[in-house]
Image (tube, rainbow, N blue to C red):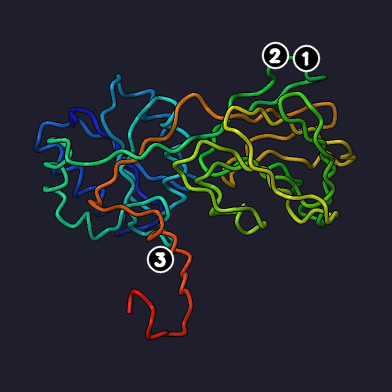
Amino acid sequence: MNLNQVIISYKAGDAFSQRRAEQCASQLEKRGCRVWMGPSGPKDNPYPVFLASVQPPIDLAIVLGGDGTALAAARHLAPDGIRILAVNIGGHLGFLTESADLFQDTEQVWDRLLSDRYAVQRRIMLRAMTFEGNRTNLEPMSDCYFALNEMCVKPASADRMITSFLEIEIDGEVVDQYQGDGLLVATPTGSTCYTLAAGGPIIHPGLDALVLTPICPLSLSSRPIVLPAGSVVSIWPLADRELNTKLWMDGVLATAIWPGQRVDIRMADRPAEFILLRENHSYYQTLREKLQWAGALVRHSSHPHN
């Protein structure tokens, strides 16, 4: 890997994350690297400025924060094929990030990157666009939205909880109509987030698949569906007098969807690429640690690991 041009984002409002970002920038600049740095958070989005200011190629994005910071980086950088080194500095759960312990000796990290001593994990992304009229209309009426975890269609109102009425098509065929709190279309990465809380399955990120999960459906027969990654999921709001139905990308508001419109969700053309520094990375270890799986507490003398 070259380190000629690097962008660094840090968790907005976190002083420690900012100090580490400044330290990284100083070290890289001494190595002749051009660095662009800025905060990332709910009210701070540095990526449009980065992408407009830097002439390609951008060799690396260093993201210091938690999963939310990493998700924001993936949404903006994955479409351009920019690799991400996400480190859990100032974050909480840290599903998508490298441990801060591996980032203590940053000079050693730069040496490892320059000598290609790292792994790259590719995680599929979702792409969504909205359309007017029936499904034969292929002219989008919105921007293209990206998500690493999930796309969510559900109402948003400051006054009351609203039930959504949604019709679902998969590859042009009507599958079901859902009445409930909303609907999730998730990647394997997102299967351990909102989808898991909604009763969906955990899917290994090595699989190319989508999972469709209703949120609190008012029907016992409505169940999650695992789909091939090449599927196109179309979602139609059927009844929404107050026009409150929204499309959310990784928990961030994308756009409103009105009756007579649809949102098409599919796998994005490019995956997110995350740099792995751990030499013996294990997805199952991540599940045990982050979901705090304890396993059986009963100890048997015949257990093979005793």
Q: Where does the image place residue 154, in percent across and percent down from the top left? A: 74, 45
Front position in the image: 16 or 95? 95
Q: Which mark is residue 136?
A: 1
Which type of secondary structure does the marked residue at label 1 adopt?
loop
The 10 Å Cα crowd at callout 3, few under 14, some 14 to 19, many 20 or more, is few
The residue pinned by badge 2 equals: 139
Instruction: Report whether 136 appears left or right of 57.
Output: right
Lower position in the chain sequence, tag 3 or tag 2: 2
Instruction: Report whether 237 appears left or right of 104.
Output: right
Q: Where does the image place residue 92, in percent across and percent down from the top left? A: 42, 62
Instruction: Report whether 247 appears left or right of 20.
Output: right
Up the image or down, 95 lies above or below 135; here it is below
The 10 Å Cα crowd at callout 1, few under 14, some 14 to 19, many 20 or more, is few
Residue at 19 percent across and 30 percent down: it is: 1
- Distance, label 1 to label 3, CA atoms, is 47 Å
Give the amino acid at mark 2.
Glu
Give the amino acid at mark 1.
Thr
- Distance, label 1 to label 2, CA atoms, is 9 Å
Give the amino acid at mark 3.
Glu
Residue at 44 percent across and 60 percent down: it is: 287
Which type of secondary structure does the marked residue at label 2 adopt?
loop
Up the image or down, 213 lies above or below 50; here it is below
